[in-house]
Image: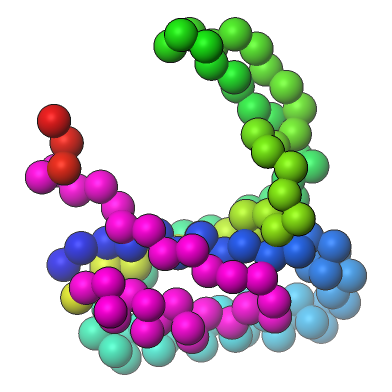
Amino acid sequence: MPEYVFLLLGDEAQDEALSPQEWEEAFAAHGAFSEEVARRGAEITGGQALMPTSTATTVRFEGGEAVGVTDGPFVELKEALGGFYVIRCRDLDQALELARLVPMGSGGVEVRPVMGEDHRG
């Protein structure tokens, strides 16, 4: 079965405003999502929540060589990558069905296929 990455994009300011109880509820909702993925015959093979973009460091490249290191994310966006799942699904239809179940207060879920060995040169 192919794997898909679910990129969880949201507003970091909303996340920072959550109370400890709201964080606990959010993690419980993701636990319930994980159980639903398995119940539907798919498998979460990876994933993590990410620290805020303020903790990011970017290595920049030019002509194939690293030319500098800067604090912060590569691009400035209103929505930031807050976490991800890697999920083995039957096909894109199932991946999109599961993406609709990710517990997100706002923002979006970008679904992208993982490059398999058959796509590598």
Is 95 situated above or below 16?
A: below
Task: Say left or right for 1 vs 107.
Answer: left
Q: Position of residue 1 (x, y in %)?
A: 16, 67
Task: Say left or right for 80 vs 108.
Answer: right
Point 89% across, 70% down: residue: 17
Point 28% across, 79% down: residue: 93
Q: Nearer the viewer, residue 117 or 27?
A: 117
Which color scheme is applied?
rainbow
Q: Position of residue 37 (x, y in %)?
A: 36, 83
Q: Is residue 43 visible?
A: no
Residue 76 highlighted magenta (yes or no): no
Is 65 situated above or below 70?
A: above
Task: Say left or right for 116 vs 17.
Answer: left
Q: Please provide the residue range marked out in magenta.
A: 91-118
Q: Is residue 3 visible?
A: yes
Q: Where is residue 27, by image quadrant?
A: bottom right
- In the displayed orientation, state which residue is furthest to the left: 118
Is 70 situated above or below 8?
A: above
Which quadrant of the figure contains the C terminus? top left
Q: Where is residue 90, by image quadrant?
A: bottom left
Q: Where is residue 83, by image quadrant?
A: bottom right
Point 76% across, 27% down: residue: 71
Task: Give the number of marks.
Answer: 0
Point 72% across, 49% down: residue: 77
